[in-house]
Amino acid sequence: MLIRPIRESDFEPVAALTNIYIRDTAIHFAYDPVTAAELRELWTRQRDTYPWLAAEVDGAFAGYAKAGPWRERAAYKWTPEVGIYIEPRVHRRGVGKALYARLLECLRAQGYRSAIGGITLPNAPSVALHEALGFVKISHVARAGWKLNRWWDVGFWQVMLGAGDAPPRPIVPPPG
């Protein structure tokens, strides 16, 4: 398995994978498919602040993890929201855990203090992944979203990344 920074050439498989989760699951709350161009543009705007990583298994794209703003106001900038999408063919093979662990390492190195992951519930595998990496549940929003002809709850998990109560230091660009 190879974990590396996202490249511009990754956005066709990134969009194809994201669209599986949009089209077939309640894991992603969008209704409409995304394009590679839309995701590339989002990454281009955020790449100097937030890491996006890709995983390869046997030389083929296997998933991605990304960070982005959790809330927009300035005081929140030390806590990004994170997300991960793994190709179904490699589920339960450790790809998600390795990819997410590397994303959290990058965020620590950049100076972020914590990260937030949102999980559509029920989703025992995602809860287990987050908790295996040190995330703890901090909230539960009942019937937060309507998708696939039913209401879904959303839980939020947080992991602490850095230096306790010390004053924040400037966020540095992502590695790679």
Image (cartoon, grey):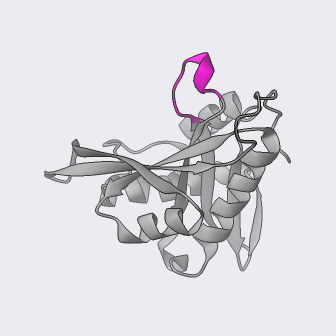
Placement of the N terminus among the 4 image quadrants: bottom right
Expressed as whole percent of the image width and height from the top left, the position of residue 49 reads 73, 32
Find the magenta span and give its range.
69-77
Left or right side of 25 for 131: right
Question: Foreground residue, 6 or 168?
Answer: 168
Residue lying furthest right? 176
Left or right side of 24 for 125: right
Q: Is residue 174 visible?
A: no
Left or right side of 167 for 24: left
Count of number-bearing discs: 0
Residue positioned 53% across, 33% down in the render: 70
Residue 41, relative to residue 175: is it above or below? above
Q: Quadrant of residue 2?
A: bottom right
Is residue 76 part of the magenta span, yes or no? yes
Question: Foreground residue, 60 or 141?
Answer: 141
Expressed as whole percent of the image width and height from the top left, the position of residue 106 reads 77, 50
